[in-house]
Amino acid sequence: MPARILSGTEIGQQIQAELRQEIETLKQAGVTPGLAAVLVGDNPASHIYVRNKIRACEALGLYSERLTPPASITTGELIAEIEALNRRPEIDAILVQLPLPKQVDAQRVLLAVDPAKDVDGFHPINVGALVANRPALRPCTPAGVMELLRRSGIPLEGQRAVIIGRSDIVGKPLALLLMHAHATVTVCHSRTRDLPGVARTADILVAAMGRAAFVTPEFVRPGATVIDVGINRLEDPAAAERLFARHPERLEEFRRKGSALVGDVHPDVADVAGALTPAPGGVGPLTIAMLMANTVQAARARRGQAVAARARVEAVR
Ligand code: GUN
């Protein structure tokens, strides 16, 4: 039986519809949450990601602005720009799109973001709060994966979760979130011995290592839930012929466009998995939805008391 498809597009839309209402209420209380996205240089993928984030803000009625310093910026200059955003009261949320150019010290830059405005959850203060399971801003992609699992009714307690990929952005924080949800978590990486064997122990298998179609059916226990965090552009026709041999509609699309987006999970995994996120259309839309949710959360937390009081006054009127 083919896998149940867990549509991130649909769940992302649900979350955005809920947020739209919340934002409306905040606006009635005089607060428009504001996001500043800092996009350094001209990495094409980063441009697309930031464009999608700004569009999502606009669609929900959030204030947003995009800063585009040149690729030649120094660490000191970038930190100065971030400190200026930290001081602006109407900016609730700051994200610095990664990767940064080589000459920039990304760790120092992320450390400069006010933790209360750190909607990516990358500041060590927020990382520490995550480790300690205390309320704070959580990284968007792992938070999105958790929301997708929760809203799809996939049980976590006592389940074996295996994550392939140990990045600071996805693998590590997701391991902590799954652990806090009482899953038994294993984190694998490029040096893991018998990776397919370890992966096959998973009830929930997360592919987050950034290698196109790396997770083949031999990695997947029949019936397991497979979450594909990867998004890779495929341009080699021979590779596309191999990958999409049993997926004629995707091969056709590749031939038409000359390229295709594929996840870290091989398309044939759909025959083995019990449930599977598509890529694209799986985790990506959840990342955006959680960024919006984090922006609202930051606005509430920063101005929460005043907003709550104003909203109560409005309600009484
Ligand atoms: N680059 C890849 N993923 C992310 C993300 O979640 N946030 C930021 N800021 N940059 C990224």
Image (cartoon, grey):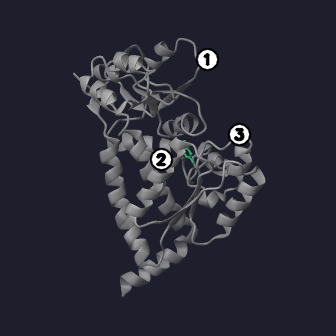
Q: From the viewer's perspective, is the residue at label 1 or at label 3 nearer? A: 3
User: Upstream in the sequence, badge 2 or badge 1?
Assistant: 2
User: Upstream in the sequence, badge 3 or badge 2?
Assistant: 2
Q: Nearer the viewer, residue 158 or 52?
A: 52
Instruction: Say if mark 2 contacts mark 1, CB within 8 Å.
Output: no
Q: Where does residue 246 sit, x and y in percent of width and height?
A: 27, 18
Q: Nearer the viewer, residue 261 or 192?
A: 261
Q: CA distance from mark 3 to mark 2?
A: 20 Å
Disc 1: which residue: 191
The C terminus, quarter of image: bottom left
Q: Tell me what residue is drawn at x 59 percent, y 52 percent.
A: 39
Q: Is mark 2 within 8 Å of ligand 1?
A: no
Q: Residues within 10 Å of mark 1 (few under 14, many from 20)?
A: few
Residue type pointed to by label 2: Ile
Q: Secondary structure at mark 2?
A: helix
Q: Residues within 10 Å of mark 3 (few under 14, many from 20)?
A: few
Q: Is residue 127 above or below residue 231?
A: below
Q: Secondary structure at mark 1?
A: loop
Disc 2: which residue: 48
Residue type pointed to by label 3: Lys
Residue type pointed to by label 1: Arg
User: Upstream in the sequence, badge 1 or badge 3?
Assistant: 3
Disc 3: which residue: 102
